[in-house]
Amino acid sequence: MIGKLNHVAIAVPDITKSSKTYEVMFKAEVSEIIEQHEHGVKIVFITLPNTKIELISPLDKNSPISNFLQRNPNGGIHHLCYEVESIDLAIQNLSGKGFKILGSGKPKLGGHGKPVIFLHPSDFNGTLIELQQE
Ligand code: CO
């Protein structure tokens, strides 16, 4: 069911500063800052040859990232995103087996304009998992 690692997301307190670090120090391919109002975050994608890094920062105080940054003021790894062929099939399989899907349990459009869901860290050894349709 699970496909490629699409990205590793790192929560950061200052997205401009962190983005510049990757651009200047690592000479990485860095996107513009993208505001995702549906998710309450702003993101930057860093494209590596085999995967991407997603820097995420809160859009406002109600952002789901705000609590994380309160616990981890310097930032930290926030989630891993795996690709799946069909998000609907993934939802069906996982919720049928009692896995917890965050939010409404329905897919939202993620940073790549593709449907995504988030799975609760308690089912995955403390790691928040995002599934994105290929
Ligand atoms: Co993500």
Image (cartoon, rainbow, N blue to C red):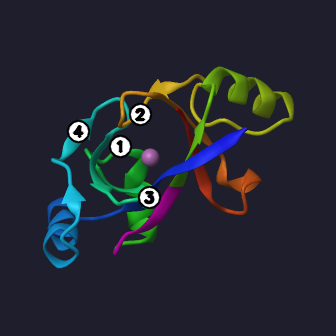
Q: Main secondary structure of the magenta part?
A: strand
Query: Who's the residue at 18% across and 78% down the image?
Result: 25
State yes or no: Cβ of the residue under disc 2 lies below 8 Å from any atom of ligand 1: yes
- In the image, taking residue 35 as reference, residue 55 lies left or right, namely right
Question: Which residue is identified by label 4?
Answer: 35
Label 1 near label 2: C-beta < 8 Å? Answer: no
Cα–Cα span, label 1 and label 3: 33 Å
What is the secondary structure assignment of the residue under circle 4?
A: strand
Label 2 near label 3: C-beta < 8 Å? Answer: no
Which contiguous range is marked in magenta?
74-79
Question: Which residue is identified by label 2?
Answer: 110
Cα–Cα span, label 3 and label 2: 20 Å
Question: Which residue is identified by label 1?
Answer: 62
Sequence-wise, which precedes: disc 4 or disc 3?
4
Sequence-wise, which precedes: disc 3 or disc 2?
3
Question: Which residue is identified by label 3?
Answer: 50
The one nearer the camera, 47 or 77, is 47
Tell me the amino acid under the disc marked 2: Gly
Crowd class of label 1 (few under 14; some 14 to 19; many from 20; radius 10 Å): few
